[in-house]
Amino acid sequence: MYIKNIEIENYRNFNNFRMEFHDGLNVIVGANNCGKTGLLKAIHLISCPEDICADDFNKNNIKQNYASKYKEAPPEITIKYLIEHDISEDNTEDESITKLLSFIGMDKINESKSASSDSIQYTITACVKMRYSLNAKEVGRYLEEAKKITKFDEYYDMLKFFVKHYSWHYTNGMSEFEIDKKEATNIFKVDFIEAERNSGTVYKETKGEIDRFLKADENVASIQQFQQDLSSEMKKLIKQVLANIQSLIDNERNAIGLEKGNVAIAQDIRSTISISDSYVIDVKDTKSGYTVPLSHNGLGYNNLINMYMLIRLTEIKKGRDFRILCLEEPESHLHPAMQYKLFKFLKNLDETNDLNQQIFVTTHSSNITAVAGLDNMFMMDYKRQDDNEDCVQQSLQIQFRDNENSKKHMMKFLDVTRSDMLFADKVILVEGIAEKLLLPKFMEKLRYSYEDEHISIVEIGGKHFSHFINVFAHNAVEKKVLCVTDKDFKWFQSEKIEPISNYAKFVPSHIETINKCFIDVTNIHIVSQKQLGRTFEDELFMSNIDNDYVLIKLLQIALPDSMKDFIGENGTNFYKWWNNLKKVNQKSREKILPILNRYICACKCYIKDANTYKKLFFAELFLTYAKNKKGDVALSLLVEENLMNEIIVPDYIKEGIEWLSK
């Protein structure tokens, strides 16, 4: 039995929200304040409806309607839980049908009936509708007060006063037939482990399990006999003390008039020890053998113990599928490796159908998302761009439903580093390490705050942009994704030089494919080189072609140390390099000369563009030496503060950042 979907109206961040769930593990990711905790609270309300106050009303909804809609009727909070349960015709011991009986839609049972080889199976669909509304006898007084209100703050103060007259009302969400509160709140046992947690939840659960055992009819007589035997042993232990006290009792002899009232003093030993209260969970040091209380142990391991016990306790409980566990930020106080281990354990239980409960997890940990799996993951966001502010969500399982190839790629490459994009407000996808390292600095130069905008820069290690774009395309979250890719224009086909005019017309096949596949997607933007560069490195060089200081520094960083003096003497003078290359050592000369000769030929072929080809020679030279050590070159640029101050950001990156900032 599990919650298949939830519909929330006018509660916290949720104005009119709907979300589908899985019957096992559900991992919910998103930026801060996007509604993740509110969703867990809404799930928790099905078993703990008292956990609500005036501040749980959706303030945007109230602010928009307090002067109109809510002058005619008081605001309400509505939550609907659609519950599904599979039951076999032969299973006469399944208690779920009893718990759900008042909320079942009979037509749904008939529609879900299907035959199997062993017996007929049914899928039962039930709907619990909870409505938090003002008691009818107070509505008139509310309307009178509401008419006097002219300001939002005044209205909210009034609502806080009236909230003490609010209560939950329960109906079958399909028939609107009224149901008793206990029938709804007893369907599930929901445990909510908040981010700030202690061991109290585990103690409560284990104590409850022991109490249930002790109260069972077949165990009562044994417990009573145990209490009597314990009392007898206590009497033996303090026999002399009891005798001394008895002598005092015997010596009363009506000294204070007890006999007249037919009263005498009696003593006994009755064991009042509570077995469940005597139960403790401690931490044992497996190396030294000693134990310490949980309160004296580290928070990280305590969290693991708490979560493990709550997950596995379902195995010894009757009706274990009646349980839901809500985990808020389980990574709190946990080392990354422990986070990974915990969710590997949870995922294995989910895959083998051994969770025995539905689990909801909210997280900001890329260590968790790296192992949780796309099928278990949901993205959330809080849209505040227009008047219809509300939360949105997207199942990644549905996102990849029609693209198994992309799904396999993402499952392979969605590691700890790349998982960071699931939590960011905006994403920049880049091909290599150089762009990843330098883009934050470029954004700083363009006065665009990398940190404040919560941007994730993801190096995808190639041109597989479409796989990553599939995470965000046609996604209700509509996260902005900038793709920074290389044009990869080839200036030489064999030894023949391409004319300058061909550069602007060239569209590489991978960009053509992306444009074709995501033609109607507005939250994805692709940029590539514009200033005659074919990759990031030679485009950076061409973008700074008028600054000799920058160009010389770039060449000195990329080319061998043995050429630093030569570069300093000859700068970026094409003819000086042509005339003086013989001064360079043989190894470098053999590498540079073929490149130089090709561009000499280019200058001869296209005389009017000769100056441009001379510049392209140095850009090609920089790329040739930088391409096998792009990360080192980027790091060298970052530590050269004076150089970074002088460098001009390439136009295609400027364009991308400007789009991202809108």
Image: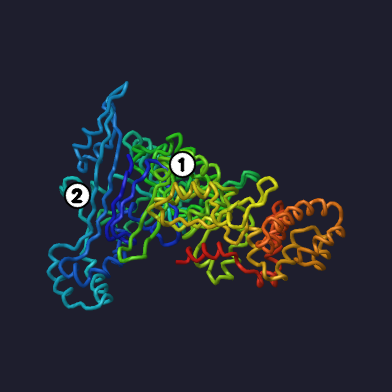
Residue 206, by quadrant, is top left
**Nearer the observer, 287 or 172:** 172
Query: From mark 1 to mark 2, how far is it between C-alphas?
Result: 56 Å
Q: First in sequence, mark 1 or 2: give its number.
A: 2
Q: Where in the figure is residue 186, as x and y percent of width and height? A: 28, 46
Q: Amino acid at mark 2?
A: Thr
In the rendered image, is residue 71 in sight?
yes
Q: Amino acid at mark 1?
A: Glu
**Nearer the observer, 117 or 656:** 656
Badge 1 vs badge 2, beta-carbon distance below 8 Å:
no
Give the SS element for disc 1: helix
**Nearer the observer, 642 or 534:** 534
Q: Mark number for residue 171?
A: 2
Q: Nearer the viewer, mark 1 or mark 2?
A: 2
- The correct choice, above or below, for 460 with respect to 93 in the image is below
Find disc 1 in the rendering and name its residue: 233
Determine the residue positioned at 46% across, 36% down: 351
Determine the residue positioned at 67% across, 65% down: 638
Mark 2 neighbour density, 10 Å: few (under 14) some (14–19) many (20 or more):
many
Q: Mark number for residue 292?
A: none
Residue 573 appears left or right of 424: right
Q: Where in the figure is residue 114, as x and y percent of width and height? A: 27, 28
